[in-house]
Amino acid sequence: MMSLKSFKPLMLAALFMLPASVMAMEEEQVYGSQLMTQQERQEHQAKMRAAQSEEEREQIREEHHEQMQIRAEEKGVDLPDEPPAERGHMNQHDRPGMGYGRD
C-alpha cells in the first residue's frame, strides 16, 4: 500500500500535467490549428467559451473555417473541405453514454 508521503508528490505531478493534457486535447479539436499560433488558438477557444448559444458557436466555427481555408490555400497546405462532423465538447451531456449521468 502506498503511504501518504509518497502519494502526495504523485498527485501534485498529475495535477501539473493535467492542464497541459487538456490544452493539447482542445488544440487538436480546433480546425486548422496546425496553421495557428498558440495565441490564436487561445483566442479562438476564449471566443468559443464566451459564446452565449450553440448558434453563436456555430457562427464562430464557420467564420474560423473560412479563415483557415484561406490561410491553408495561401500556405499551400491541404485541409479537409469540411470541419470534422463530430466535434469534441467538454460538456457532452447530449450524447448517449457521455457526460455526468448515465441513464
Image (tube, rainbow, N blue to C red):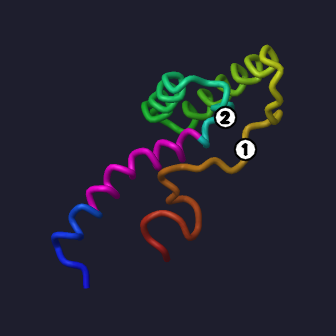
Q: Which residue is mark 1?
A: 84
Question: For the point 83% across and 33% down, which residue is it?
Answer: 81
Element at label 1: loop
Circle 2: residue type = Tyr
Circle 1: residue type = Pro
The residues colored magenta run 11-27
Query: Residue 95 sits in which quadrant?
Result: bottom right
Q: Residue furthest top?
A: 74
Relative vertical location of residue 103 with respect to residue 18 in this rendering, above or below = below
Circle number at residue 31 = 2
Question: For the point 51% across and 27% down, which residue is it?
Answer: 38
Quadrant in the picture for the N terminus? bottom left
Element at label 2: loop
User: Front-most of 10 and 98?
Assistant: 10
Image location of residue 97, percent across then percent down: 56, 70
Q: Is residue 87 shown left or right of residue 10?
A: right
